[in-house]
Amino acid sequence: MACSAHAGKLAIVIDDFGYRPAQENQVLQMPTAISVAVLPDATHAHEMATKAHQRGHEVLIHLPMAPLSKQPLEKNTLRPDMSGEEVERIIREAVAKVPYAVGLNNHMGSAMTSSLPGMQKVMQVLNHYNFYFLDSMTIGNSQSTRAAAGTRVKVIKRRVFLDDTQNEADIRKQFLRAVHLAQRDGSAIAIGHPHPTTVKVLQQMLPTLPADITLVSPGQLLNEPQNAGRQAPPTVAKPTPPRNPFKGVKTCQGRPEFVPAGRALNAITESLADSAGVRYINTYFSGLKLELDND
């Protein structure tokens, strides 16, 4: 009970659903907290969204949005220069193609999500559907949160991409990073894709999740603070060591100097001759000699 009360919450979303039923069916065999984001115009979009819902997985619309890079745009890609009516049409058709969706996230979209006017059009439409928006954070200055102001749309944000590469070791490293962020900050969202390597890593690592990590759907994080770290536990002040009065005082750096033997012997002789003991002996015996002479 103590672990669950302070557990970090980890949400994992698998994007690009609708094109690879073989791998996607493997994802649907994973814990139901794993969520799926379906491309509206994918060949198996309706089928996979329905199957995911029936098996208890949360479904999102994975909507193409215009990137900053110059590349061919997919069908029904949202662009910043579109009218509100065109944005509404594309989202309305996407909702029909992806049944049971409760949220929407962007496929690519660096140009669209960094445009405040463009994202305001998106949020106005999502407000009518009571959808949340999962920002894939394909660009740092995304305007999604600002655009949602004044609407009921809640915005949550991706923290980790699991599979920027198809290297198994890299995917494991990213998975562990997502776990660490969830432990440190209280929650984290990771996004992956139905690649064979990603599916393999998830199959191996999900059963090994630490006891203080709870797997959740993105919808369960709507009221969680975004990117807010937990407060560090209070630290006990250590006793202050006594101040060193000589700290910071510059010292001369001595260097040995060669002294001739004759000079050294003279210095020793002079030092002995001037000592208190020698002076006493000279005085005492000098007086004794004077008395003997008088006798």
Image: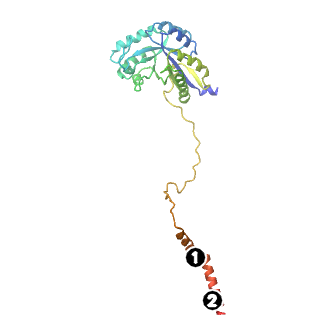
Q: CA distance from mark 2 to mark 1?
A: 21 Å
Residue 150 percent coordinates (x, y)? 40, 22
Q: Position of residue 24 (x, y in %)?
A: 52, 11
Picture quarter with the N terminus: top right
Residue 93 lies, with reference to residue 235, above or below; the image says above
N-terminal of the pair, mark 2 or mark 1, is 1
Residue 277 visible in rendering: yes
Q: Determine which residue is flagged by label 2.
A: 290
Residue 9 image-quadrant placement: top right
Q: Nearer the viewer, residue 150 or 27?
A: 27
**Which label belongs to residue 273?**
1
Instruction: Tell me residue 107's x, y (percent).
Output: 43, 17
Question: Mark 2, residues whose alpha carbon is within 10 Å: few (<14), some, or many (≥20)?
Answer: few
- 140 vs 65: above or below: below
Horizontally, residue 60 falls left or right of residue 290, namely left
Quadrant of the image for the C terminus? Answer: bottom right
Q: Secondary structure at mark 1?
A: helix
Q: Amino acid at mark 2?
A: Leu
